Amino acid sequence: MTRASVPEAAFLIASLLFIFGLKRLSSPRTARSGNTLAAIGMALALGGTFLLPGMGHFGWILLAIVIGALPGWLLARRVKMTAMPQMVSLFNGMGGACALFISLGEWLGKPSGGRELGRAFPMLLGVVFGSVSFTGSLVAFGKLQGLITEKPLRWPLQKTGNALLLAVILASSAAAPSSQNEIWILLPAAAALLLGVAQVLPIGGADMPVVISVLNSCTGLAAAVTGFAMHNMSMIIAGTLVGAAGSFLTVLMCKAMNRSLAKVIFGSFGLAPKEASAAAQGDLSMREIAASECAVMMGYARKVIIIPGYGLAVAQGQHLVHDLDEALEKRGVEVKYAIHPVAGRMPGHMNVLLAEADVPYPKLLDMEEINPEFDQADVALIIGANDVVNPAARTDAASPIYGMPILNADKAKNVIVIKRGRGAGFAGIENGLFYNPKTRMLFGDAKKALQELVTEVKAL
Ligand code: NDP
């Protein structure tokens, strides 16, 4: 093997590791090793880059790696599960910035003669997609982190402004390849940076996870085209994988929420107030229940279906759910879990949460599998879930979640809901299920309520 072919071999092995790693991410059982494989692939790709002919300035490169890796490692270790979407958004933004700066650096470092269209075109795409992804992801991060209002921000002539920015990007990109003037590459970069902000600010916080996934595919695309410009195979493959994965995720999330991508990008989900108004339910009131009564209902049931939601993740009550499950099974109660595809704040959130507490994976059933079983369940125990069990999605055509497939908790013989108070879910709307005559509310933080339930069931 010649010296020049060593980096190529490293890139090839890295690309294979990315593909196998991604494949293993498809199941919680193999996800950890998949992540490790992909990380080894990334280390190989980095190592291979050091060996590329003409490489130098190793001190600076190492310094940049330390500056990037240290905060990344610290943040990843400390981040709470519930803050994962904004962390993904931040990292995605960094990916976009990388594509922007690599393409820009490549462009500015070459005299115009070296910019034949075959290379100029991917560089321009890298600059534009990288810029949109960079600033768009930072705004999404700000919204989810509470640094920017979650409400959709609107201003006059917004769409016209965005169309103008797009026109600037197209016109200056067309002029860039044949010009010596650097303004023609800086102009689309600046317009695309602005477009990222202008496009994400008007979208409500509730739709941020979908937006992040769209921006994720944008970053993937930016990395892939930058790979074309640099003739770097592993960048092309890694970028394509990220782009394709982001696109699939976007489609799946939109499907699970029954919202078109256009509605997410141009709609107004999340405009409703966060605190639901009881007035919407007329004179109906919620009926409270004590933990001891819940324990009797569940302890003497034949079948209990547990519905975990965002509140369970916030309360970090997953280990207690498993304890409750075991206590009930000891009494001969059949316990299953109903997993809605968008329960929580990121795809697979509930699966990851419950896997962390060693809940056996076969007990977690997807919506399509579990929905036909609700009418045989004696109790549906809803823990910190709201939108994913809201019957308005089936019946109220005016509701922002109308059409979203939901878990049929209302079909169970009895429904118990654990939540702290009357707070609305992510969509900010009232939930009629909480006023249903067969529903009982066990008010309190999910962890505390579950602790009481476990004690009471064990004492039966
Ligand atoms: P929701 O956000 O609808 O409801 C969560 C409920 O948990 C709230 O009503 C809140 O009520 C309660 N809660 C909060 N903290 C606690 C706590 N410490 N203890 C007990 N209860 C608590 O959650 P769902 O999981 O039902 O729905 C997810 C929502 O997120 C959907 O609207 C979905 O479309 C959206 N979404 C999800 C994505 C995903 O990928 N998973 C992506 C995009 C959007 P209270 O304040 O009264 O306690």
Image (tube, rainbow, N blue to C red):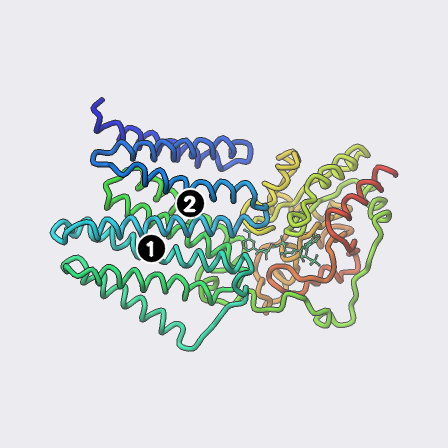
Q: Nearer the viewer, residue 292 or 14?
A: 14
Amino acid under disc 1:
Phe
Report the residue at 47% width, 44% height from top: 71
Task: Looking at this view, name the residue that lies furthest to the top.
Answer: 1
Distance from mark 2 CB to nearest ligand 1 atom below 8 Å: no
| Residue 251 visible in the displayed image | no
Mark 2 Cα within 10 Å, few/some/many (few <14, many 20+)? some
Q: Position of residue 299 (x, y in %)?
A: 83, 41
Report the residue at 66% width, 46% height from top: 372
Give the quadrant of residue 59: top left
Quarter the N terminus occupies: top left
Image side of residue 345 versus residue 412, left or right? left
Tag nearer the camera, 2 or 1: 1
Tell me: residue 396, above or below residue 38: below
Q: Which of 409 and 71 is in front in this view?
A: 71
Amino acid under disc 2:
Ala
Image side of residue 250 versus residue 145, left or right? left
Q: How far apart are marks 2 and 1 (CA)?
A: 16 Å
Q: Which mark is residue 245?
A: 2
Q: Position of residue 374 (x, y in %)?
A: 70, 47
Which sits earlier in the primary sequence, circle 2 or circle 1?
1
SS under mark 2: helix
Q: Position of residue 316 (x, y in %)?
A: 67, 45
Image side of residue 443 versus residue 133, left or right? right
Tell me: residue 164, above or below residue 4: below
The residue where tag 1 is placed is 129
Image side of residue 182 versus residue 337, left or right? left
